[in-house]
Amino acid sequence: MKHNHIAGRWMAGGDGLDNVNPSDTTDIVGSYAVADGGMVAEAAQAARAAFPAWARSTPQQRADILDAVGSELLARREELGTLLSREEGKILADGIAEVVRAAQVFKFFAGEALRIPGEKVASTRPGVEVDILREPVGVIGIITPWNFPMAIPAWKIAPALAYGNCVVFKPAELVPGSAWALAEIVTRAGVPAGVFNLVMGPGSLIGDALVDGVDAVTFTGSVATGRRVAQRAVGRMIRCQLEMGGKNPMVVLDDADLDIAVDAAVNGSFLQTGQRCTASSRLVVTEGIHDRFVAAVTERLERLAVGHALKPGTEIGPVVDSRQLEQDLSYIAIAEQEGARRRCGGQRLTRETPGFYLSPCLFTETTNAMRINREEVFGPVAGVIRVRDYDEALSVANDTPFGLSSGICTSSLKHATHFRANSAAGLVMVNLPTAGLDFHVPFGGRKGSSYGPREQGRYAVEFYTSVKTAYVRAG
Ligand SMILES: NC(=O)C1=CN([C@@H]2O[C@H](COP(=O)(O)OP(=O)(O)OC[C@H]3O[C@@H](n4cnc5c(N)ncnc54)[C@H](OP(=O)(O)O)[C@@H]3O)[C@@H](O)[C@H]2O)C=CC1
Ligand SMILES: O=C(O)CCC(=O)C(=O)O
């Protein structure tokens, strides 16, 4: 059984939890220890005790550790990518790419550790010097979802450590394997005992204890859990950062290049089994291109190979587990009851191995008021909304409680520019899928999708540091 890491030691805890391969439920990836609230509190205390010394460590020491983590991830990309795909169900190429992305994030923040910004500002008073300094916040609680089991932990752990914070990391219950492997690498890279702690176990059991023991919490996951985490964090007056769901629109205008639009829709809506918060689950299409677009997307979806994540040739792996599959199937049923027309897919598939296979499902004749277009399904399911023109497309695109990502396919500079300026989302894509992001620039949304400062890139410094303004009488 793989153990939790607390105060520099590997600790068992209670019963282990089996990690099941969604491509083949007879394949148990491993058994992982489950922490209880007491162990989480112990981890938070260990992190607090380690903090003063770690906060004083040199930027070079932290940079070297993060760089070493990145190098090991890169060297082991195939092995770790295979583990990731085996436990989460994304295809092997995507599993490997995600490990590389995690490595790039660690190397990026190795550089940022050496570039912690500060400012000197002239005082309004004579003989006074003013410095604006950034200091680490303290102990950061990190709660991550199952859909990016390496990349999301990486883009939270790396900046936390780079800026001199200690960490208590709780991965999603469905993907302890990637989290444990990452933790094992971090602990061997030279972090002093207590600086980095791993606590595995169901969020419903240990989530509250985690929020209660830290100085700041960063969360990615569902809206419902995000709200709960935020309320608890605000109750303690600690800072929190939330990345939650999306109902991301991809607008396709009459003048779009059809091939680009179809590629963007198939990729953005269905690859990685649609299990991306940036997935384009609403396809907002103008009348003149609607029928050609729907026909071409349907034709591509019917050819996509759904199967075992590790099998060569597979383009879409399984849904992550039975609960998520039930959620996808229930939204498909609701869409039909509400009058949407199922153009293709939406069927449970059987393959050589028992897994949670679902064919990619496209609905047409949908309205923006239908539940399928308002609530996050988080599966290979998208609805086409037919609109008259660009103005209606923009209004439909923005009519959502979410605001993570949005996209437009058009050859009109005027409409692309207008959309970029007026889309109410944190990420805007022109002639590109709404999902699939660079690792070195800020990531986050607006409205119900995000709360708190941006993640990733240089902007991560806002969440992971605390500003101090220092006045000194000169001479
Ligand atoms: N936007 C996004 O990036 C994601 C959205 N989702 C959406 O969420 C739905 C449910 O997925 P699920 O994995 O259950 O999402 P959750 O929001 O429940 O899980 C995200 C993380 O929060 C943890 N968590 C659960 N309950 C608590 C709690 N009370 N306090 C603190 N942390 C907690 C989870 O732990 P544990 O796994 O151990 O329960 C996990 O680590 C999906 O169907 C999808 O719609 C899911 C993943 C990512
Ligand atoms: O689209 C991506 O590359 C990242 C998306 C993401 O972070 C998520 O789905 O949780």
Image (cartoon, helix red, strand yellow):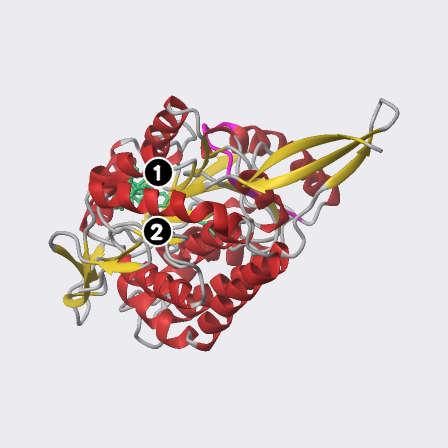
Quadrant where the image shows the C terminus = top right
Q: Is residue 144 visible?
A: no
- Residue at 65% in and 47% down: 410
Magenta segment, which residues?
399-410
Q: Secondary structure at mark 2?
A: loop
Q: Residue at x 17, y 72 (%)?
A: 352
Q: Residue 54's spot in the image, x, y percent? A: 49, 51
Task: Give the vertical position of 389 relative to 20 (above or below).
Answer: above
Give the answer, above or below, for where 404 lies relative to 128: below
Name the quarter where the N terminus is drawn.
bottom left
For residue 191, side relative to residue 469 (left or right): left
Please, is residue 9 above or below residue 56 in the view? below
Indicate which label's residue lies in the foreground, 2 or 1.
1
Mark 1, residue position? 222
Q: Is mark 1 within 8 Å of ligand 1?
A: yes
Q: Amino acid at mark 2?
A: Pro
The x and y percentages for residue 92 are 37, 70
Which amino acid does the dot numbered 1 rest on?
A: Ser
Q: Residue at x 43, y 35 (%)?
A: 215
Q: Which residue is tagged 2?
A: 380
Q: Can residue 339 be found in the magenta stretch?
A: no
